[in-house]
Structure formats: structure tokens, C-alpha cells
Image: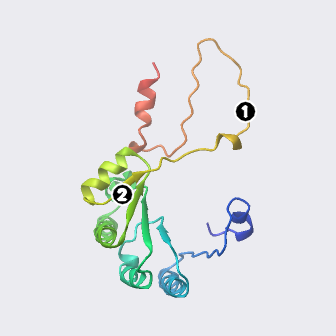
Amino acid sequence: PKNAKISEIKKYYTLHNTFIFRERNIFSIITNQIRLARLLGENKYDIIHFEILPGFRVSLLFPLIKRLTKHTAIVQKIHGVPLVEVQYKKYGLIKRALYRLDWTVAKSNIRKYSSIIVVNSRYMEREIKESIPNKKIIIIPNGVDLKTWRKQELPEKKSSKKIIFWGRLSEEKGVDFLVRAMP
């Protein structure tokens, strides 16, 4: 986030070196790629974990990353695919074409350079296997640390059912299945 502070992040994670790259415009995207290339050239890393899809924004940087980090495993996390996202369907023609191009380049980069792909559900595993066959995929579900939540006593009703849904109200989240499952 734009307001992220290293001191806040360090409360939750043990960090040795932390670098924040923020993308605000095309200049910051290019600058960040140069900073990342320099960082990778100066340090030896065992693993590089990409949280975002490495599409055309980093297509020129990926071969350089792999050259600088010959013995580094590249882990790609994919949480969503633009072509199946609901918002994608609502975009105009040009934005949809850019997303298609980005996903095409991302698939090529992932095939060539990633060691493993991490997804958060069986649904995403199936989607990725169709798009990027012959890659090792593991599922690590999103989770909640229940210790961080205070237990609250809710008023008891004899016939009440308690359900919580936390997510965006959109088709791919499957809230309709939750509602139909209530009875």
C-alpha cells in the first residue's frame, strides 16, 4: 500500500532487507525494474516469489532476472486470471485487449522461468493447468489465524444459523452457492 511503513511490517515478519516498490505511473514501473535488476545483481537469493503476474510490464526484465539468478528458484503465485475475472468482462475493448496481451506474455514468462506455481484453490489449479500445462502447481489455501480474533458471544436463537462470508460480492466468489446451501 502507498502508506506502508517498514516499521509496521516488521511487527509481523522478521525481515533482513526490505524494499518497497510502488507503481504509480509508467516512469515508476521502469524505475522499479531497474532497481530490482540492480538488487538481484548485488545479492544472491535462494527464492524469488512473484505475487503479481509477470506480464508484459516485466517481459524484458525476466530473462535478465534469470541470468542474474541462475541458481534461484522462481515461485509464481497466481490468485486470479484476468480472463475469468468478472471485472474483466465489464472492461472496454482496449482494456480487454491489453489484459489478453498481458496474460499471454505472463503465461510465456511463467512457462520459461518459474520453478513452481502456487494457487489458492482447486478452481485456480484447474484454470492454470489449462493455460500453463506441465508446470508443478501446489495449492496453499488462503487462511485466517483465528487466534487474532476475539471470541464474541452472540445472542443465541434456537433456529438461527450463523454464517460468515468475507469477500467481494462477485460471480466467481460463489456466494450464490452459499445462499442456496443454507436450507
Q: Are marks 2 and 1 in contact (CB under 8 Å)?
A: no
Q: Earlier in the sequence, mark 2 or mark 1?
A: 2
Q: Which residue is mark 2?
A: 81
Q: In front: mark 2 or mark 1?
A: 1
Amino acid at the residue labelled 1: Lys
Above or below 171: residue 48: below
How packed mark 1 is, by other alpha carbons closer than 10 Å (few <14, some 14-19, many 20 or more), is: few
Occupied quadrant, residue 112: bottom left
* Residue found farthest to the top: 158
Residue 93 place in picture, x, y as percent: 29, 65
Occupied quadrant, residue 156: top right
Secondary structure at badge 1 equals loop
Between residue 28 and residue 119, name the one nearer to us. 119
Residue 130 place in picture, x, y as percent: 25, 54
Residue 108 appears left or right of 71: left
Res. 160 mark: none
Above or below 88: residue 6: below
* Residue visible at 36% across and 55% down in the picture: 137
Between residue 152 and residue 133, name the one nearer to us. 133
Res. 151 mark: 1
Occupied quadrant, residue 66: bottom left
* Residue visible at 57% across and 21% down in the picture: 161
* Residue visible at 47% across and 50% down in the picture: 140
Amino acid at the residue labelled 2: Val
Residue 109 appears left or right of 173: left
Label 2 to label 1: alpha-carbon separation: 35 Å
